Image (cartoon, helix red, strand yellow):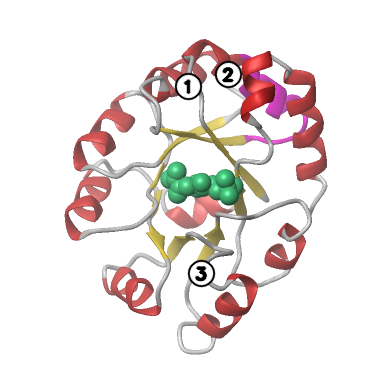
Amino acid sequence: MKTGHDVLELSAVLPVVVVDDAADAVPLAKALVAGGIRAIELTLRTPAGLAAIERVATEVPDIVVGAGTVVTPEQARQAADAGSAFLVTPGCTDRLLEAVSSTGLPFLPGVSTVSEAMRAAEHGITALKFFPAEASGGVAYLKALAGPLPGLRFCPTGGISPENAPKYLALSTVGCVGGSWLTPADAVTAGDFGRIEQLAREAAALR
Ligand SMILES: O=C(O)C(=O)C[C@H](O)[C@H](O)COP(=O)(O)O
């Protein structure tokens, strides 16, 4: 993988995952693989995030692991050192863009406005996360963006569900969608990886 466009092609659905215990990440990633999902975005929302990335990167070779919720330059460097194959940020500042770029990893910076998308494009970044997708205008907003900015492609995330995902995936400007619905917190806490495998199987069949 070289650029964010390669990240968009990994999987129709990119699971956005929060773990409180890094040990849960390995069986969780294996359940996703068993359900047909080959990419995972492990967020840095919890202190377990970095260790979870490290463990999945070494113990689950069948899945491509990236870091999500990268909001500081230091996190970008730590996520790269932990073995992330890509980085995802909820928004982008100049400092953060510079830090994620300097890791050499492919990345998807988050945008939610026309000007943010144009600013990213000025930096040559044309694969973006659209966040928070539903709250920012959803499918209609993305369709409207494609008029003036036809060269951009997106991973809409935030409020995506099995019900609305097909509408996003039908857009030519959408490479994949992101969402947390495949790995519900109660299933992770209960160690119900069978349920996660089933949710992954249904998500993998969405496109
Ligand atoms: O943590 C980040 O970096 C984010 O940008 C937020 C997540 O992508 C969304 O919270 C996922 O959205 P849901 O699928 O609606 O739960």
Instruction: Let me know if residue 1 appears in the view.
Output: no
Q: Does the CB distance between marks 2 and 3 fall below 8 Å?
A: no
**Distance Cα–Cα, label 2 vs label 3:** 35 Å
Q: Does the CB distance between marks 2 and 1 fall below 8 Å?
A: yes
Quarter of the view holding residue 97: bottom left
Is residue 185 a member of the stretch shown in magenta?
no
Disc 1, SS: helix
Disc 2, SS: loop
Quarter of the view holding residue 128: bottom left
Quarter of the view holding residue 32: top right
Q: How many marks?
A: 3
Is residue 32 a member of the stretch shown in magenta?
yes
- Seen as rendered, the residue at the extreme left is 95
> Which residue carries the number 1 mark?
57
Q: Residues within 10 Å of mark 1 (few under 14, many from 20)?
A: many
Query: Closer to the camera, 153 or 90?
Result: 90
Q: Residues within 10 Å of mark 2 (few under 14, many from 20)?
A: some
Query: Closer to the camera, 48 or 5?
Result: 48
> Which residue carries the number 3 mark?
136
> Which residue carries the number 2 mark?
60
Type of amino acid under label 2: Val
Instruction: Let me know if residue 64 appears in the view.
Output: yes
What is the span of residues highlighted in magenta in the rendered image? 27-38
- Seen as rendered, the residue at the extreme top is 23
